[in-house]
Image (spheres, helix red, strand yellow):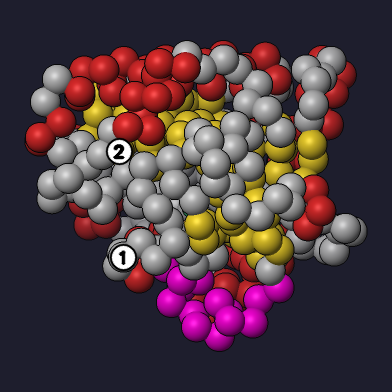
């Protein structure tokens, strides 16, 4: 394990690069707008100590749980709205109930903590999935587009956001090992670059056949039926970044090491990121309304609409 903490990797801020904003104490309400602005500028809010409690027994249970069957290479997802877990081995048996209860508690605490930290966003988000990541990330096999060790911006093909933001809170629960990330330039730089490579998003087709197909997909509740041109672009951009060997090789990179028991928060649709090493992390995703942004002009949606010259979500 490296003993170097994350702060030492952020000497000065270059344009389009992320900076670490360390939060040691609960900030006052007037600080909240600044913290939102830091996130929206592509910076990482970093808590050297996880700012909410976590029962020791639950931690030990998580660290001891091993996936052995066919689902081994998957992270475990928790869906708070349904109180349901996916990606777990069938062999987990009774452990599944305990794991589900632990994930509910993590999700609840993360939600409550973020609500207190960032009042401008609070109650203007949808609590999305949480996840438990018990696998060693170094060398973890995955399809190219599913690899998390290649820098990318996040986009969920079956959970379109229509311009709302993907905000993620991570906690390293590994007692010994850092979680190692790299970030590259942020979306204000990469959006225009990849728009040139993959083409600007087009406005939604208004022809009657396309409209009818969309309504039918929505009526049937098909996954992704509410995808907008914005979502299509972000998903293509996610893939193009991972598939672009030249970009992966030559992009400016910053390396971050998140030590045991630290927590960090990032807008991962704006900060291009990858995980290189680490095992045992928890994560909660929030889909924050675009209308809650304190600097809406900096969002990926605003950047892309500025380039395209037309709306991308209506
Ligand atoms: C990712 O969101 O790409 C992975 C981050 C992590 O698991 O630390
Ligand atoms: Fe990601």
Residue 253 relative to residue 272: left or right:
right
Tell whether label 1 touches label 2 (CB within 8 Å). no
Q: Position of residue 79 (x, y in %)?
A: 32, 27
> Dividing the picture into quarters, in which one does residue 61 lie?
top left
Q: Where is residue 256 in the image (x, y as percent from the top left)?
A: 67, 54
Q: Residue 16 has which mark?
A: none
Q: Is mark 2 on a helix, strand or loop?
A: strand
Q: Nearer the viewer, residue 2 or 188?
A: 2
Disc 1 designates what residue? 141
Report if residue 290 lies within the magenta region: no
Spatial CA distance of label 2 from label 1 is 16 Å
Crowding at mark 1 (Cα within 10 Å: few <14, some 14-19, many 20+): few
Crowding at mark 2 (Cα within 10 Å: few <14, some 14-19, many 20+): many
Disc 2 designates what residue? 76
Q: In this view, does 80 lie above or below 261?
A: above
Q: Magenta part mainly helix, strand or loop?
A: helix
> Dividing the picture into quarters, in which one does residue 14 lie?
bottom right
């Amino acid at each position: 394990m490296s003993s170097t903490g994350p702060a030492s990797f952020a000497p000065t801020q270059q344009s389009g690069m992320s900076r670490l904003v360390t939060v040691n104490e609960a900030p006052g309400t007037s600080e909240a707008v600044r913290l939102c602005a830091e996130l929206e500028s592509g910076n990482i809010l970093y808590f050297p100590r996880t700012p909410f409690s976590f029962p020791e027994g639950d931690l030990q249970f998580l660290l001891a749980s091993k996936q052995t069957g066919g689902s081994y290479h998957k992270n475990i997802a928790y869906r708070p709205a349904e109180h349901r877990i996916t990606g777990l081995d069938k062999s987990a048996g009774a452990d599944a109930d305990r794991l589900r209860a632990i994930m509910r508690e993590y999700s609840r605490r993360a939600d409550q903590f973020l609500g207190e930290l960032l009042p401008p966003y609070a109650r203007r988000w949808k609590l999305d999935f949480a996840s438990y990541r018990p696998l060693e990330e170094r060398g973890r096999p995955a399809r190219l587009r599913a690899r998390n060790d290649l820098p990318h911006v996040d986009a969920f093909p079956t959970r379109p956001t229509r311009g709302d933001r993907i905000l993620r809170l991570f906690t390293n629960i590994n007692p010994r090992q850092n979680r190692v990330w790299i970030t590259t330039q942020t979306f204000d730089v990469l959006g225009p670059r990849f728009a040139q490579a993959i083409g600007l998003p087009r406005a939604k087709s208004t022809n009657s056949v396309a409209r009818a197909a969309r309504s039918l997909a929505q009526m049937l509740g098909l996954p992704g039926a509410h995808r907008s041109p914005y979502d299509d672009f972000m998903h293509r951009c996610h893939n193009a970044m991972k598939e672009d060997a030249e970009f992966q090789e030559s992009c400016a990179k910053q390396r971050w090491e998140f030590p045991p028991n630290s927590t960090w928060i990032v807008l991962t649709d704006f900060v291009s990121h990858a995980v290189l090493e680490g095992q045992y992390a928890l994560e909660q995703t929030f889909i924050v309304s675009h209308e809650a942004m304190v600097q809406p002009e900096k969002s990926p949606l605003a950047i892309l609409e500025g380039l395209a010259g037309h709306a991308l979500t209506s």
